[in-house]
Image (spheres, rainbow, N blue to C red):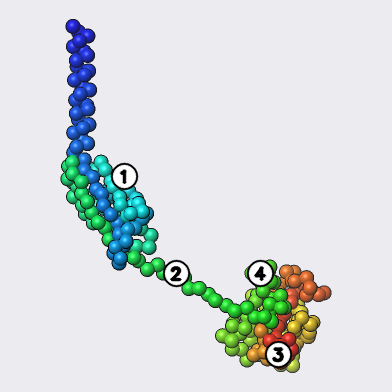
Amino acid sequence: MIQRTVRSAIIAGLAFILAGAAHAQEQSGRLMGRIVDHANGKPLAGARVALRDTDLSAISDNQGMFEITGIRPGLHGVDVELLGFEVRSAPVRILAGQTIEAEVRLTARPIELPPIEVSVRSPRLEAAGFYDRRLEFGSQGRFITRELIERRNPQVVTDLLYNQPGLRVEYDGVGRRRVTVNRNAGCTPMLYLDGVLGDNSSFDIVRPETIEGIEIYIGAMIPIQYKAMTDCGVILIWTRRGSRG
């Protein structure tokens, strides 16, 4: 008798739990619908639909369809987002035991991209190995192209060498400009004009408008083919036609 009573109580309790679960399931609501492009009505796949302040969310399929179940009845904030489109947010009232259908139209959002920088390689500098050395030495050298020379519009070549890290431009005793290395006033970088070793005092003999590019190397980091009997540095000047113009 006692065992039968206990068994009946267990069965009754289990039935109560199952009934409670079924009742809770009946009381929850469902949100389903479709995500489309506002401009043309085409379905959008991969959009995320999320109920604010809950863990419930869904991703739209290839037909733009989504479904979220087990939603507690009441007013919920819904956010819909997809890369390249403006986020759409709206309140939705979920009713107990009912399905709410919605169509969400997303508006494309323009994505601002950084400008594309286009530069034309100079055949003259390409042949001289300018670009290969710029890639190899990177920030260890200074590379001045024709575009920069035209923007600076210098009167003489040494105008381009002012404010270059590691260099100093000063006048010698006879009114000519002399280029030295900052760390040692008596240290003068070697000058190569179109690959030929020249005189350090002849920088301003070359007219700026005839120059295609300039390379500056200070200290020990000098391309091996231009490393002479100095560790001061090397300045390479490349003219447009391989001459002093």
Q: State the mark number for residue 113.
A: 2
Kind of residue at badge 1: Asp
Label 4, residues with CA under 10 Å away: few <14, some 14-19, many ≥20: few
Q: Residue at x 71, y 90 (%)?
A: 206
The residue labelled by disc 1 is: 55
Quarter of the image holding residue 166? bottom right
Reading the chain from its start, which is encountered first: label 4 or label 1?
1
Residue 42 x, y percent position in the rendering: 32, 61
Reading the chain from its start, which is encountered first: label 4 or label 2?
2
Kind of residue at badge 3: Val
Reading the chain from its start, which is encountered first: label 2 or label 1?
1
- Distance, label 2 to label 1, CA atoms, is 33 Å
- Distance, label 4 to label 2, CA atoms, is 26 Å
Reading the chain from its start, which is encountered first: label 1 or label 3?
1
| Placement of the N terminus among the 4 image quadrants | top left
The residue labelled by disc 4 is: 135
Quarter of the image holding residue 105? bottom left
Label 1, residues with CA under 10 Å away: few <14, some 14-19, many ≥20: few
Q: State the mark number for residue 206.
A: 3
Element class at badge 3:
loop
